[in-house]
Image: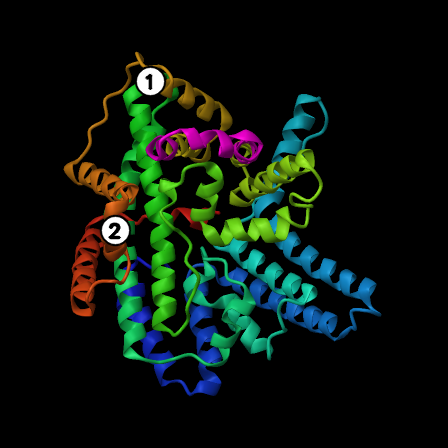
Amino acid sequence: MQFDSPIFFLAFLPFAIALIFAAPRRYSNVAIIILSLVFYTWGEPRFALVVVASAAFDWIVARTMHRIPEDRGRRSRKLLLLATIGENVGLLVFYKYLAFAVGNLDRVLSLAGGKTFAVPSIALPIGVSFVVFEKITYVVDLYRGVALPANSFLDYLAYVLLFPKLLAGPIVKYHEIADQLKVRPKNLEDIREGATRFCYGMGKKVLIADLSGDIANAVFLVPVARLGFQEAWLGALAFSVQIYFDFSAYSDMAIGIARVLGFRLRENFNYPYTAQNITEFWRRWHISLSSWIREYIYIPLGGSRAGKGRTYLNLTVAFLLCGIWHGAAWTFVVWGIFQGLFLVMDRAFWLEKQMGLPVIARQLGTFLIVTVSWVIFRSPDISHAVGYLGVMASVLKHGTFLYLRNDQIAAMILGYILIAIPFAKRYQDWADRFVGMQWAPDSSLCASMAVLVLAIGRVSAASFSPFLYFRF
């Protein structure tokens, strides 16, 4: 079920709020689980059973591991930890990467003249990457001693299935909301704040991301041979707007819905296109994912504790895995390596050298690098990405003329205005008021409702457009 679908915000969400507020405290997590299962099984009925069974396995193994004394049962604890991680990674590999791996092996065997075999057709469940990462987080934190086990399986299942963040994050650690799973406030203030955040997210998705995405989709469908310099840059800049406003909109809507239900989820974006280098970009973009990579991949690999060479290798490996996490395609592999190499350059020399440049030059340079990386991310294959980037470097190349509607042009302009406002410090407070909740309560709610009305009008007249991160 999509947040921006009429069935969700006209039927499911009002029913969910009513049920949560009506349910006695002792049954509030049961209500969350029921709602989340309905929400998820609306589009993924088969995988819901897999998630519940997998969560039960995690719960049993993690609780067993916690009962084993750390000083006398280190080996047993580690084996249980590896069993749970293996089970979760196995789910991810089976659903997301098995067909990709078999397909590539089949091509290699075919080129070598060997016997080929059929590539399995496995449907990718929505949100599987986010579910697996959160489940791994729970058991690893328990093993490290930074979190206590859930009081009951229902508490743990409510954490795993919590529907606002179920499909595309933010990635939440269990101990961040453990207390909220026990007791949650039920008040009108949370409803107002959450509803305002949801409405703004709805506007970002429908009025900016989807319309900019129409431009990007049209450009990326043009064969590279017929693509011109201007059109190539238009597509890249349009996709930069689309992916930011699409994904940040989902986070806004998820955080808003969770707030209405009494949960406080972590922020996931902090003006990422104002970053002065790639290191800072990843502190501002998809914050829950980048912090997960740092804590559960980069640091366990050794982090920066074993010299420069090992640090650079760890950064590259961590972001190679980040790229693979986004999808089973060579474009994501290359995109991950691309990000890792720029992080290595930051650490090696750029963070120091950049200090001699004006802030705006650092920000624009970083935005250019990110935009180039989005071309790799968006392209259907490596050859298309290489050709597309070649056209972006060919100033004199002319190509197919693309007709743009006025609403698409307006969406792009609005997107870049909102992106550019925080670049000037004197406008930072204004930007915070616009995208946050610092307005007077009545004016903020009224403005958000106006945005919601416009978004609903757009949804009713436009074709269905799923959130980009559902495919990852």
Q: Nearer the viewer, residue 65 or 301?
A: 301
Counting residues from the N terminus, which is met first, the one under dot 1 or under dot 2?
1
- Residues drawn in magenta: 340-364
- Residue 417 position, x and y percent, is 23, 41
SS for callout 2: helix
What residue is rendered at 28% in x and 17% in y? 399
What residue is rendered at 40% in x and 23% in y? 388
Q: Nearer the viewer, residue 195 or 106?
A: 195
**Dot 1: few (<14), some (14–19), or many (≥20) neighbours within 10 Å?**
few
What residue does disc 1 label? 226
Residue type marked 2: Ala
Q: Quadrant of residue 135?
A: bottom right
Judge whether residue 186 is colored magenta. no
| Front tag of 1 and 2 | 2
What residue does disc 2 label? 431
Residue type marked 1: Arg
